[in-house]
Amino acid sequence: PSSYKVVVIGGGAGGLAVSSTLSNTLGKGEVAVVDPSSVHNQQPLWTFVGAGLKQLDETQKPMAEVVSPNATLIPEAAAKIDPESNTVTLADGTKISYEYLVVAAGIKLDFEAIKGLPEALGRDGVASNYSADYVEKTWEFLQKFDGGNAVFTMPSTPIKCAGAPQKIAYLAEEHIRSKGLRGKSRVIYNTGIGKIFAIDKYADALTKVAASRGVEVNLLHDLVEVKPKERKAVFKVLGDGPQAGQQIETPYNFLHVTPPMRPYDFLKNSALANAAGFVDVDKETLRHTKFANVYSLGDCSSLPTSKTAAAVSAQSYVVKHNLLADIRGEKRPAERYDGYTSCPLITGRNKLILAEFSGYTGKPQETFAFDQSKETAFAYWLTSSVLPSIYWKGLLQGTWRGPSPIRPLLNPTGSN
Ligand code: FAD
């Protein structure tokens, strides 16, 4: 089989952040990137696309253009990993071998897990920002909405960008109000988990935002079925409260679904997976717990922090440092990932709460010296106008490792 010094599975945010630096450092032909997708998606921008604030084509680039010229792009899906023999079998049956493996395949959207959803999606008011195929439908259906129930869902599984399911609710609420339809509309946010956001500081701020905007928040309400003919969404009440176990039918005129997500089968079925199916890595060094020549980062990894591109920025630096030290046989101290992640919680067309925290300590790690749980126009501008370029030109090129190097300058006391 063809063999490479490093094989990277996935040409998403994590795969490209790592493969760009590694291929430029190791030279042409040493690093392969395996990804069947012909486009790379800057997914964080899809919240803006769903609200009509950006176009889908601004979020996509041909994969061949964003993979470093020093890396070899293999446009196939990885189908099987055998870490005992250091080989990856591709969907077409070809085998490739590696000395080091980096797994960054992302997380699978599981629309099929919701009864009726695959048939309903993209029609009659049902959309999802989570997929390139349906994100434009969000804006199309919001424009057609003329009152009634606008319903937004968040599943009970781990998902990428846990804030995105509610960001679109705030943007939609603003749109509905601006059209003069607020008086004859309800905006309902049903989440399968028990809190509006994992970190209390931001959860408190979001609870106030939702209340002030009249967004009805129902915790532990997990979408289980969509009935497109009747235009009803069915929620199962989780937890152990008085309504637990009951199913509640909510009529909708617009329905934004965040699907349940799960690890891809080829990872779940591999020797690399933990019991939940995620690639089992040390949470600080990002090295596999059993196979020392394997690393993983991003949404497919077991890292116990919130799954975001911001987290990938910090993780990619750690993977590259530690992997290059392995390759060169250097005894450098390992870089350690501290669980940093960030979620830009857009609450309106010019307002944003910039949550930044460690998923390991649960403590805020704010880059700026102001209280980032406050809605600001500055944070909105940063997210809509600055971060997209940092993503293309910094993260994917391997030069952006997140804000940790600039934080001591901008927020010297780390008071927030
Ligand atoms: P991805 O970037 O998803 O890349 C995975 C890659 O693996 C893909 O290119 C895929 O084609 C490939 N792949 C899949 N299967 C295989 C296979 N079998 N073989 C080979 N390749 C395979 N993050 C933020 O930081 N801020 C935000 O505001 C934000 N908002 C978001 C809003 C939405 C609507 C969505 C969907 C995501 C958002 N995110 C946000 C999350 C962010 O996009 C992801 O966390 C990030 O892209 C994870 O990077 P990754 O490399 O792990 O996975």
Image (cartoon, rainbow, N blue to C red):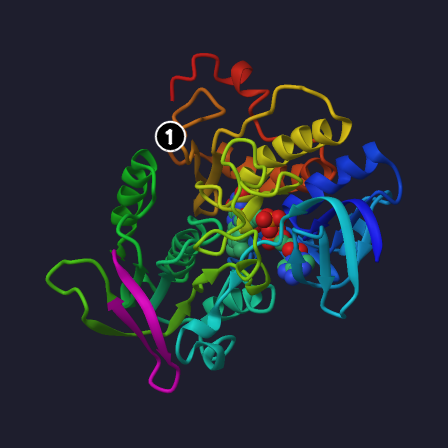
Under 8 Å from ligand 1: the CB of mark 1?
no
SS under mark 1: loop
Occupied quadrant, residue 81:
bottom right
Q: Residue furthest front?
A: 84
Image position of 65 with respect to 229: above or below: above
Seen from the viewer's position, the closer of residues 154 and 88 is: 88
* Residue 164, percent from left and from top: 45, 52
Q: Quadrant of residue 188?
A: bottom left
- Which image quadrant for residue 240? bottom left
The magenta stretch spans which residues?
218-236
Q: Residue 73 at what x, y percent from top left?
A: 81, 54
Tag 1 residue = 361
The quarter in which the N terminus is drawn is: bottom right
Near-viewer residue (26 or 287): 287
Q: Main secondary structure of the magenta part?
A: strand
Q: Residue at x 64, y 35 (%)?
A: 319
Q: Nearer the viewer, residue 152 or 106?
A: 106
Residue 54: percent from left, percent from top: 60, 54
183 w.r.t. 87: above or below: below
